[in-house]
Amino acid sequence: MGLFSRKKEAPPLYPPEKWEPVLRCSICTGEQVACMRDRESGKLREIMLIHDEGDLAAFRKTYGVTGEIPRVY
Protein backbone atom coordinates (compact mmCIF):
# COMPACT_ATOMS: atom_id res chain seq x y z
CA MET A 1 0.00 0.00 0.00
CA GLY A 2 1.46 3.31 -1.07
CA LEU A 3 1.58 6.48 0.90
CA PHE A 4 -0.94 8.30 -1.28
CA SER A 5 -3.19 5.44 -2.31
CA ARG A 6 -6.91 5.75 -1.79
CA LYS A 7 -9.45 3.08 -1.13
CA LYS A 8 -11.84 2.47 -3.95
CA GLU A 9 -15.32 3.59 -3.03
CA ALA A 10 -17.91 0.85 -3.15
CA PRO A 11 -20.97 1.82 -5.18
CA PRO A 12 -23.93 2.75 -3.00
CA LEU A 13 -26.31 -0.11 -2.55
CA TYR A 14 -29.84 0.39 -3.75
CA PRO A 15 -32.36 -1.93 -2.12
CA PRO A 16 -34.57 -3.36 -4.88
CA GLU A 17 -37.75 -2.87 -2.85
CA LYS A 18 -37.15 0.91 -2.83
CA TRP A 19 -35.13 1.57 -6.03
CA GLU A 20 -35.52 0.25 -9.59
CA PRO A 21 -33.00 0.58 -12.45
CA VAL A 22 -34.05 2.61 -15.51
CA LEU A 23 -32.38 4.06 -18.59
CA ARG A 24 -33.05 7.77 -19.11
CA CYS A 25 -32.91 8.35 -22.86
CA SER A 26 -32.89 11.56 -24.85
CA ILE A 27 -35.20 11.64 -27.85
CA CYS A 28 -33.11 14.27 -29.66
CA THR A 29 -29.51 13.10 -29.14
CA GLY A 30 -29.98 9.44 -28.27
CA GLU A 31 -27.91 9.86 -25.08
CA GLN A 32 -28.54 7.17 -22.45
CA VAL A 33 -27.92 7.45 -18.72
CA ALA A 34 -28.28 4.54 -16.30
CA CYS A 35 -30.30 5.68 -13.28
CA MET A 36 -31.99 4.37 -10.19
CA ARG A 37 -35.59 5.53 -9.71
CA ASP A 38 -37.19 5.79 -6.29
CA ARG A 39 -40.36 3.72 -6.43
CA GLU A 40 -42.24 6.04 -4.04
CA SER A 41 -41.36 9.53 -5.27
CA GLY A 42 -40.17 8.80 -8.82
CA LYS A 43 -36.93 10.76 -8.34
CA LEU A 44 -34.01 9.67 -10.51
CA ARG A 45 -30.44 9.26 -9.27
CA GLU A 46 -27.99 9.19 -12.19
CA ILE A 47 -25.36 6.47 -11.98
CA MET A 48 -23.39 6.42 -15.23
CA LEU A 49 -23.44 7.49 -18.87
CA ILE A 50 -23.94 4.61 -21.29
CA HIS A 51 -21.76 4.85 -24.42
CA ASP A 52 -22.01 1.26 -25.66
CA GLU A 53 -23.05 -2.26 -24.69
CA GLY A 54 -19.91 -2.66 -22.56
CA ASP A 55 -21.01 0.19 -20.29
CA LEU A 56 -24.47 -1.32 -19.98
CA ALA A 57 -22.95 -4.71 -19.12
CA ALA A 58 -20.75 -3.07 -16.46
CA PHE A 59 -23.81 -1.35 -14.94
CA ARG A 60 -25.72 -4.65 -14.88
CA LYS A 61 -22.80 -6.48 -13.24
CA THR A 62 -22.07 -3.78 -10.65
CA TYR A 63 -25.67 -3.41 -9.46
CA GLY A 64 -26.87 -6.98 -10.10
CA VAL A 65 -29.49 -5.99 -12.67
CA THR A 66 -31.08 -8.84 -14.62
CA GLY A 67 -33.80 -8.77 -17.23
CA GLU A 68 -35.07 -5.84 -19.26
CA ILE A 69 -34.36 -2.29 -18.05
CA PRO A 70 -37.26 0.13 -18.69
CA ARG A 71 -36.55 3.34 -20.62
CA VAL A 72 -37.71 6.77 -19.46
CA TYR A 73 -37.90 9.61 -22.01
Image (cartoon, helix red, strand yellow):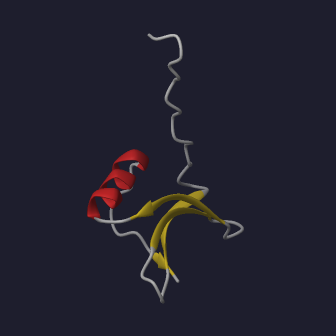
Position of residue 68 relative to residue 3, above or below, is below
Could you tell whether 36 is left or right of 67 in the image? right
Q: Position of residue 28 (x, y in %)?
A: 48, 89
Q: Residue at x 40, y 46 (%)?
A: 62
Could you tell whether 21 is left or right of 59 in the image? right
Q: Position of residue 6 (x, y in %)?
A: 53, 23
The image quadrant where one finds the N terminus is top left
Q: Nearer the viewer, residue 1 or 9?
A: 1
| Total count of labels | 0
Q: Residue at x 42, y 81 (%)?
A: 30
Could you tell whether 31 is left or right of 13 in the image? left
Q: Position of residue 31 (x, y in %)?
A: 45, 76
Q: Nearer the viewer, residue 34 or 6?
A: 6
Position of residue 18 relative to residue 27, above or below, is above
Q: Position of residue 55 (x, y in %)?
A: 34, 57
Residue 19 lies in quadrant: bottom right
Q: Residue at x 53, y 63 (%)?
A: 35
Q: Nearer the viewer, residue 2 or 12?
A: 2
Q: Extreme left residue here? A: 53
Q: Extreme right residue here? A: 41
Position of residue 7 relative to residue 17, above or below, is above
